Image (spheres, helix red, strand yellow):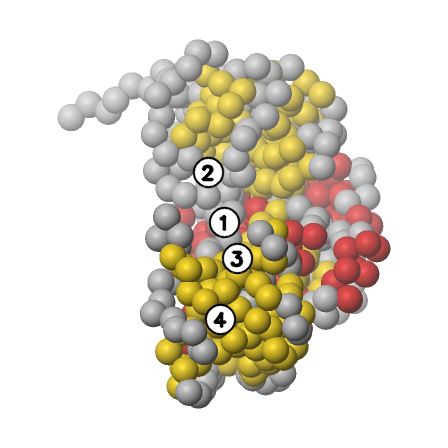
Amino acid sequence: MSKKVKEIQLRRPPVITIMGHVDHGKTSILDAIKGSDVVAKEAGGITQNITAFDINFKGRHLTLIDTPGHELFSNMRKSGVLMTDLVLLIIAVDDGIMPQTREVIQIIKDNNLKTIVVFNKIDLPSNNITKIKSDLAREGILLEGYGGDIPFQEVSARSKIGIDDLIDLIFLQYDLLEDIYTPENTNSLVVLESYKDAHVGNISLCIVQNGEVNVGEYIYSLQKGELGKIRSLKNDKMESIKEATESAPIYLSGQKDFLNVGDTIIFSKSKLNIEPQQTNLIEQIDEFNEEDLFAEKSEVKKLSIILKSDTVGSLEAIVSALESIELNNINIDIFKKDLGDISEEDLNTAKDTHSIIIGFNIKASPRIKKIAQSMHIVLMIYDILYRLVEDVKDAAESLIPPEYIEIDNGRAEIKQVITLSNKSIVLGSLVFEGKILNSSKCKILRKDEVIFEGKITSLKHLKNEVKEVATGTECGIIVSHSIDAMEGDIIVSYIVDKV
């Protein structure tokens, strides 16, 4: 059989993903290539979000994707290699193969990714490069000269040693790849990260996969369907641009929905018919059922969390990390997860659901902090993810299951039972103890026997709806269900409080 003849096309710029263990110098190498100071901007010197940059080296362009090195970002790193020609596996020669190094090696093997091993910090005296090369062979990474064909480069990001040689090696290896780029019919982008801007709205960091994307084009997600139209495009320097071509990293705005790491966006000058395939990562609040709270098994402790983050990628990583925590008889429940700063709505939800609020790389205004304090709501904000996870684990381990007690507000005696034309039943009553509260829980007693439990749905005094009725006052009470009440029955208004 004859081989299929490929059409010769101009190659797009290579897309390179930088991966490796935390603190092995991935962002420092990127900093050396870019001539910027990315590391200084990272919390704790650790990359917290996926970023991408366009590099112009001697007239040739390449796109570098920087992925977080901490173990919490495993899913993000896997998403970062969705559109990758080469992986730079960064290993610090003073440290060697570490847990995240092995994790990256597994990703490389699973995806059959072309790789360049970069040995960083070669100017340090504690240089174990010979041993590391042997260790890599045991991990299945066979370097040139060590029984394999995987190239490597020795560099020092701090001293700028070997950086130009590394870039030359990247282009050499890319030019040797057998696959020749042939554009597909479908114009598409790959989402690397998403976040919310208070002024602009939803923003997604994307790599152009196929075609030339322009401002004003319609955008669709294979996962969520129609998203709207592109309102603005920005390059990696956050400069406004009108269009972008293959491999370019861009910041896209105009989408009406949040996009998840790894989502594919289709763009077109005309409208398309694309049906959504799955739901959004950002979950809506489940309806809170107070009865479920009391139905929980007493031996199982529960830590309920409202989680707010700056980007979808970080949110995904935090959720994955928290869900992996295994503790006996303790359930970590992420009741709500969303993007953006902490709001008063979050506080009210936390109060209703007895949740703590955890934020990552977001803000809580002084007003929100003051309200949270007055509402006795635990509010914790972090910029280092592993510290967040450690604190949540500590909180869960020390969790004492809450106890709930009923506190009576007041009692009223039913003087008259009135059936209205709409079949609603009004209990004409006289408050003789405490006060009756509108919308509170209630019981109806007949000779100290409970004949009804429910909620007061309406409380009236002289035909006016009121919030409460005090001792010695007559009122009309309507409860949540139809009942067979009689004159002389006692209505007890009460609340459920946590001890």
Labels 3 and 1: the sequence-earlier one: 1
Q: Which element type, helix, strand or loop, lies under badge 2? A: loop
Q: Image point 63% across, 83% down: which residue?
A: 499
Q: In the image, 374: left or right of 423?
A: right
Task: Say which of 189 and 131 sits in front.
Answer: 189
Crowd band around label 1 with a 10 angstrom C-alpha radius: few (<14), some (14–19), many (20+):
few
Q: Position of residue 273 (x, y in %)?
A: 35, 21
Q: Viewer-nearest of labels 3 and 2?
A: 3
Labels 4 and 1: the sequence-earlier one: 1
Labels 2 and 1: the sequence-earlier one: 2
Q: In the image, 439: left or right of 22?
A: left
Q: Which element type, helix, strand or loop, lies under badge 1? A: loop
Q: Viewer-nearest of labels 2 and 1?
A: 1
User: Label 1 amino acid?
Assistant: Gln
How far apart in space, not on screen, are marks 3 and 1 (Cα)?
Answer: 29 Å
How far apart in space, not on screen, are marks 3 and 2 (Cα)?
Answer: 48 Å
Whether residue 60 is visible here, answered yes or no, is no
Crowd band around label 4 with a 10 angstrom C-alpha radius: few (<14), some (14–19), many (20+):
some
Q: Are marks 2 and 1 in contact (CB under 8 Å)?
A: no
Would you place residue 374 above or below residue 64 in this image? below
Q: Are marks 2 and 4 in contact (CB under 8 Å)?
A: no
Q: Are marks 4 and 1 in contact (CB under 8 Å)?
A: no
Q: Tag count in the figure?
A: 4
Q: Image point 50% across, 81% down: which residue?
A: 301
How far apart in space, not on screen, are marks 4 and 1 (Cα)?
Answer: 45 Å
Q: Which element type, helix, strand or loop, lies under badge 3? A: strand
Q: Which element type, helix, strand or loop, lies under badge 4? A: strand
Rendered image: mark on residue 415 = 4
Q: Provide the residue designation for mark 2.
A: 263
Q: Image point 45% across, 67% down: which residue?
A: 416
Q: Position of residue 103 (x, y in %)?
A: 50, 61
Q: Provide the residue designation for mark 1.
A: 284
